[in-house]
Image (spheres, helix red, strand yellow):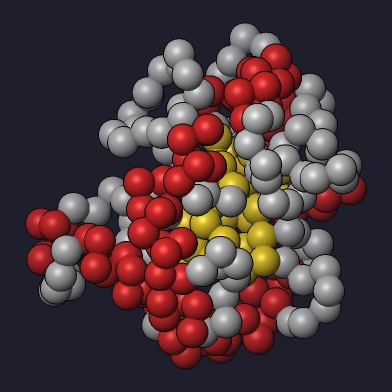
């Protein structure tokens, strides 16, 4: 059976709240994302529990440091048995190559992806830090660097997915947040896309938080999204 392209973002303060939600989900229906908020409180113990329950875990810690530190941090993350980890492409080629060395070459190594430009940054923010070019050209440039450094893909907006697939090829994975199923709230996301539109645009994995985690019935919400995407043929 092909695995789900949906990654549920466990954006919680308390491990018990995260686990009570996870109790209502299944590894067939979703993978899970643990970010800085939950990891800072709950640490590797929670990650290991999720892995033991059979879930693919995306450890979203966005490493950005000197190459040696990132290599060792990536090795530590891989030792937790997670499915995916990430780094900031702005850390540069040497840092990304170090991260790639850190995850190793085992067949079950984590996928390693890069964050290009934070979607919270606009043209003014870029100018403030001396980054020339439009957001689109910078995203494409950083995604190219990530690919050259041996990474498996990037986090991007679904709006960028078609362009990135065209330039980087079908095998380079695209992980896209900002997904809103038909008829759900937009929350604080500025530019949203439905699950079907994002997959059609070239996204490989959809990061979905509140439309599932804040739903009255999270399992039902997840099943509804699967129903919506069931007509599309997916990779795993
Ligand atoms: O609740 P929602 O679906 O908006 O959650 C999206 C998740 O994706 C959050 O964990 C958020 O931090 C993350 N994310 C994002 N936009 C990015 C990168 C990550 O929304 N550009």
Residue 236's place in the image compared with 170, above or below, is above
**Can the viewer see residue 122?**
yes
Residue 180 location in percent, x, y?
46, 27
**Can the viewer see residue 50?**
no
* Left or right of 149, for residue 129: left
Answer with the quarter of the image where residue 137 lies.
bottom left
Q: Nearer the viewer, residue 13 or 195?
A: 195
Residue 221 location in percent, x, y?
64, 18
* Left or right of 170, for residue 142: left
The structure residue drawn at horizontal position 56% and vertical position 64%, both measured from the top left corner, is: 170
Residue 160 location in percent, x, y?
36, 53
Residue 211 location in percent, x, y?
53, 23
The structure residue drawn at horizontal position 22% and vertical position 60%, both measured from the top left corner, is: 135
**Which residue lies most toward the top here?**
216
Residue 169's place in the image compared with 181, above or below, is below
The structure residue drawn at horizontal position 35% and vertical position 46%, both measured from the top left corner, is: 159
The structure residue drawn at horizontal position 68% and vertical position 45%, both measured from the top left corner, is: 234
Residue 60's place in the image compared with 94, above or below, is above
Residue 51's place in the image compared with 129, above or below, is above
Total marks placed: 0
Answer with the quarter of the image where residue 54 lies.
top right
Quadrant in the picture for the N terminus: top right
């Amino acid at each position: 059976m092909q695995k789900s392209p949906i990654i549920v973002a466990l954006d919680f303060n308390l491990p018990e709240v995260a686990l009570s939600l996870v109790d209502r989900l299944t590894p067939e229906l979703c993978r899970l994302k643990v970010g800085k908020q939950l990891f800072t409180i709950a640490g590797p113990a929670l990650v290991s529990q999720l892995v033991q329950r059979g879930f693919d875990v995306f450890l979203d810690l966005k490493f950005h440091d000197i190459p040696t530190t990132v290599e060792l941090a990536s090795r530590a993350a891989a030792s937790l048995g997670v499915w995916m980890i990430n780094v900031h492409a702005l850390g540069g080629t040497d840092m990304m190559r170090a991260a790639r060395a850190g995850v190793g070459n085992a067949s079950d190594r984590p996928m390693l992806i890069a964050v290009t430009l934070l979607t919270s940054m606009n043209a003014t923010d870029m100018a403030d830090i001396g980054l020339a070019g439009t957001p689109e050209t910078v995203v494409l440039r950083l995604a190219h660097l990530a690919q050259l450094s041996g990474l498996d893909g990037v986090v991007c907006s679904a709006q960028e997915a078609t362009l990135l697939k065209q330039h980087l090829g079908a095998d380079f994975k695209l992980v896209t947040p900002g997904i809103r199923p038909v008829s759900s709230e937009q929350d604080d996301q500025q530019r949203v896309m439905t699950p079907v539109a994002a997959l059609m645009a070239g996204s490989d994995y959809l990061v979905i938080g509140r439309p599932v985690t804040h739903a009255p019935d999270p399992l039902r919400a997840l099943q509804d999204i699967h129903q919506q995407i069931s007509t599309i043929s997916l990779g795993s």
